[in-house]
Image (cartoon, rainbow, N blue to C red):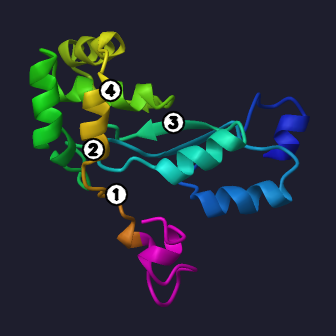
Amino acid sequence: MQKCLEMGLCRCIGVSNFSSTKIEKLLDISSTPPAVNQVEMHPMWKQGKLRETCGAHGIHVSAYSPLGGPGNAWGSTAVVDHPTIQSIASKHNSTPAQVALGWGLSKGASVIVKSFNEERMNENMASFELNLEEEDMFEIEKMEEKKIMRGEFLVNQTTSPFRTIQQLWDDEI
């Protein structure tokens, strides 16, 4: 990919699902840091350490499944159904999705939502107008951490370089 960049075939390089450890290892051997790291990130999987690492190296974080992936085979409604998110949504006369998206945006991440429903798309856009208060952010920070797309299918004892979930995510899970 660095060669493609040098040849002008792309404008920037990005990575996906890189832990802080993998980012540091990549930076040790790469002449060009990635412009973006796309990872699962939502109020229940805040990626604090990773956001700090990426920020220190000027790498933008882009959040996939910022609502927890409801509707996907591996996804969950745990984020939008969480009582804290529900309460903050009610307080601001907004939706739980807007709160989750607003949280991600407030952390400086871009958020990638998936919808073909025009009403939901407009609703998602309204998250840009939501101003979460310091108290709201504090309550979200207290929520338990839970990675939803854990990647069990990538781990095994025979053909995978990763024998455990902890190895896959460099003990950042």
x and y percent of residue 73 in the render?
A: 23, 53
Q: Quadrant of residue 84?
A: top left
The first of marks 4 and 1 along the sequence is 4
The first of marks 3 and 4 along the sequence is 3
Seen in the picture, residue 115 relative to 29 is either above or below; the reply is above
The residue that mark 3 highlights is 62
- Measure how far apart labels 2 and 1 are at the Cα level: 8 Å
Which of the pair 145/16 is nearer the observer?
145
Which of the pair 62/118 is nearer the observer?
62
The first of marks 4 and 2 along the sequence is 2
The first of marks 2 and 1 along the sequence is 2
Q: Are marks 2 and 1 in contact (CB under 8 Å)?
A: yes
- Measure how far apart labels 4 and 2 are at the Cα level: 26 Å
x and y percent of residue 12 in the render?
A: 74, 33
Which of the pair 13/105 is nearer the observer?
105
Q: Are marks 3 and 2 in contact (CB under 8 Å)?
A: no
Q: Residues within 10 Å of mark 1 (few under 14, many from 20)?
A: few
The residue that mark 1 highlights is 149
Q: Which mark is residue 134?
A: 4
Task: Identify the secondary structure beneath mark 4.
Answer: helix
Q: Which mark is residue 137?
A: none
Residue interval drawn in magenta? 154-173
Mark nearer the viewer, 3 or 4: 4
The first of marks 3 and 1 along the sequence is 3
Mark nearer the viewer, 4 or 1: 4
Q: Amino acid at mark 3?
A: Ser
